[in-house]
Image (spheres, rainbow, N blue to C red):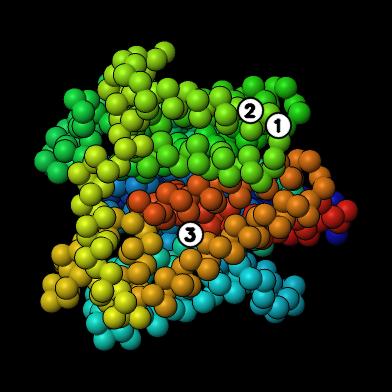
Amino acid sequence: MSMKDFEMRLRDQRYAVFAALLAVSLVLSFLITNNGLIVGLGAIAMLIGGIVLVFSFVNLQFGVLFLLSISFFLQGVNRFSELPLGVINDTFVMVLTFGMIVQNVRKGNFKIPTDALSLIIFAWVAYNVLEVLNPAGNIEGWLHGVRGLIMLSPFFFVVRYVSTRKFVETLIHTWLFFALLAALYGLYQEFVGLLPFEKQWVMADPFRFKLLFNWGRFRIFSFFPDAALCGILMAYSSLLAFILAIETNDVLRKIVYFTAGLLMAWVLIYTGTRTAFVILPAAFGFYCILTFKKGPIAAMTAGGLLLAFIIFTDVRSLGPLTTNSLNRIRSAFAPTDDRSYQTRMYNQARIQPYIQSHPFGGGVGSSGLYGYRFNQASELASFSPDSGFVRAAVELGWVGLIIYCTMYFLVLRRGIIAYFNLRDPQLKGYCAALVSVAFCLILANFPQQSMTQVPTLLIFYAVMGMLSRIDELEQPIENKL
């Protein structure tokens, strides 16, 4: 192609772009003039969203990072909107999955992943789909419940496919950046106060107010829909930051990681999420056992002594922590004195005969809110599972629970094997951090349904995807996209 032809083609492209922008401007002006500003802004949002989706389809790494970024805000925004914003996550995952399939087809790669993690994800999805045939269930409950269980699972395959050494680092840092942003806003809520529209939202529902106003103070929820989600996210994100601070030799990074971890752990206390108080030290203990390094073991010992001092003494203040915060921490380690814990244990004991007599459960979406809305004839309609494991047992039966537990076992097994296979110090550190986060989330899923909300569910699938490939990334030739 001659220079003249090139200049003509470039000029033609400029004219095309100009014409497209002019047409879009005219359409938006018409919409705003005839339908108001809200409709116009909605059209602009749809246009931008369409462009982002197309770009994500072409560049999967960008799509993964963009989806993870917006997932930190969508549920919080959904508090003040009747729009089904959660569908954005599902749509994005479907677009990314289709983009991955198209790229594989173009490369002539028709091989289906057969590693243990991929196979258990396939089994989990297939079992949940087949649950639509469960005679004890209800089709409406299944349609609503299955979305939270499997719709985001293809994200595992996308992250697995796009993972390179550089991308793993970028994904981890993106996650930490938005977790730190949430922590900083949480500190703003604690020391400046809730914004007027946030107070109005809390006060609008008596049940919500009861959940968020405990022990004479508001529990911090940052820009998330509830304090429990915020607290658990702060727990596993601070764990990630602390481990990366230990594993890196770069002094500046060590300071940044440690500071971020400290701020997130600080906000964790103000969320009042007792599950998070337990899982953070427990998961750090898992890291100590995995690596068996003297420094982390010494830190764990010192932290354990400090925690014991808080629990077994009547100290009323400790640094920035007041009596209220210290009492909340103590209550997490004395569950037998807690009425909500006693109620959960009673409910779980009461439902055991049902689980034992229903190997395939009562059907997806047959318990909790969906059960009450769509299948009131079921004996599970009035049962609130509270725990992710209990929900799997009652809705999917002990057969489904076996698949569920096997999936978690294989995640930890994969991460532990990868850690001991790796020789590269940086990748070894990332692997130790990721498998410790996986342990933290699995542990949190016992007292809470921690795997049903984003961004936590997306992060868990991303962790699985990175762990499935991480010990391949230190090879001299990386798999390029």
Q: Nearer the viewer, residue 262 or 409?
A: 409
Q: Secondary structure at mark 2?
A: helix
Residue annotated with mark 1:
294
Residue at the image point whose x is 41% and y is 13% from the top: 319
Quadrant location, the N terminus: bottom right
* Position of 254 relative to 192 (above/below): below
Label 2 vs label 1: CA separation?
6 Å
Q: Secondary structure at mark 1?
A: helix
Residue annotated with mark 2:
298
Q: Residues at badges 3 and 1 in contact (C-beta under 8 Å)?
A: no
Q: Amino acid at mark 1?
A: Lys
Residue at the image point whose x is 76% and y is 28% from the top: 249
Residue annotated with mark 3:
92
Image spot of residue 124 (x, y percent): 48, 73
Q: Secondary structure at mark 3?
A: helix
* Position of 438 relative to 374 (above/below): above
